[in-house]
Amino acid sequence: MRRETRLWLFGVAGAALAGLMGWAIAGLPSFGDFQGEYGRILNSVAEPERHVWNVVSAVTFDYRGLDTLGEELMLFAAVMGVALLLREARDEGERPEDAVRSDMIGAVGLGLVGPAVVVGLYVIAHGYLTAGGGFQGGVATASGLVLLYAAGRYSSYRAASPRALIDFAEGTGAGVYAAVGVAALVVGAAFLENVLGLGTTGTLAAGGTISLLNAATGLEVTAAVVLICHEFLEEVM
Amino acid sequence: MIPLQVVAIALVGLAGLAVVTARDPLRQAIVLGLFGLGLGVLFVVFQAPDVALSVLVASAVALPFILLTALAKLGGRDPG
């Protein structure tokens, strides 16, 4: 196609798209004017029913806990796929010396390892009190560990996250989530029903199974991200 | 809409433009991380901290990491 024809085509299509986008945006409800019934009901019942402040966590780990189980297993399967494809007959011997040469990057980066891991663990632990939860905190914790490689050397990163431990944590995280669901069946409730004591709102010992599922997700996601980084970095080492 | 929100939207728009106009893949991966950071700020000023955290870890941490390792595996700055 000639350049001129392309520009004409883009001009017409772009103008039509811009018009439709403008029309759609003009019809949006104004900010804060949410009309969804489900969200309004959850906002008013989640705290008295589940004793947690973060309604998002109450939805992901309780009201729609089954969806999160599916997402956990999807992540688990994806990570297993990466490991199966990349972790075969690899040379585990000598590695090139890859220590970061810049003192500045080393000092700042390694200084951030501790804070990043602590923030990640905090975001996991307080997932049902404030914003965050197992997924976000898990990736943050794992990224703190990956900083060991980015600002230090690969062997430090591997030493801080032994493969056996990471594999175990990955499976345990996914397994505990499903086990909590089955445990509810054992005591005669529905799958993943919140059967534990709900505790005092605003404390870490609140929310019943929400806290357990949140911790299991945090473990699973942390291990999954660390494992993916292992396998990808092995490829480029 | 408060001015801060307008600024955040404008920043995300500019960062998005910067991502698609960057020609060098390595540069593009870094700019994509900054775009994710901008999206995180956008969601914070729109009072959606949960979404902000999710978008931060996904598009400012995980995605650039995968792109950068892929670029390192390909060896050069330009995989052709």
Image (cartoon, helix red, strand yellow):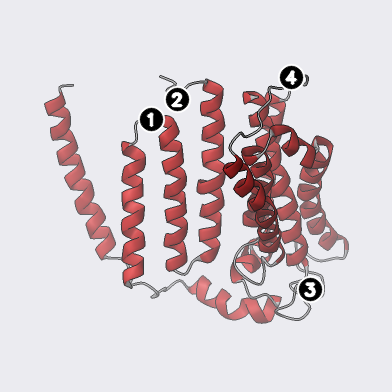
Task: Find the distance from the CA under tag 3 to the CA under tag 4.
Answer: 45 Å
What is the quadrant of residue A73 in the picture? top right
In the image, which is nearer the foreground, mark 3 or mark 2?
Answer: 2
- Estimate the x, y position of residue A100 in percent, counting from the top left: 62, 34
Is residue A180 left or right of A149 when viewed as pictured? right
As helix, strand or loop, the secondary structure at mark 1 comes to loop
Q: Find residue A187 and name its label.
A: none
**What kind of element bears circle 2?**
loop
Viewport quadrant of the C terminus of chain A: top right
Viewer-nearest of labels 2 and 4?
2
Residue under disc 3 on the same chain as residue under disc 4? yes
* Circle 2 crowding by C-alpha within 10 Å: few under 14, some 14–19, many from 20: few
Q: Residue at left 44%, top 21%?
A: B79
Name the residue that disc number 3 marks: A205
Q: Nearer the viewer, residue A192 or A109?
A: A109
Kindly indicate whether the residues beneath marks 2 and 4 are on one polypeptide chain: no
The residues bearing labels 3 and 2 have C-alpha atoms spaced at a distance of 50 Å
Q: Chain of mark 1?
A: B
Label 1 sits on residue: B24
Q: In this figure, which residue is indicated by the disc labeled 2?
A: B77
Co-location on one chain, circles 1 and 3:
no
- On the rendered structure, is A52 left or right of A19? right
Mark 2 or mark 1, earlier in chain: 1
Looking at the rendered structure, the kind of residue marked 4 is Arg
Tag 2 near tag 1, CB within 8 Å: yes
Q: Earlier in the sequence, mark 3 or mark 4?
A: 4
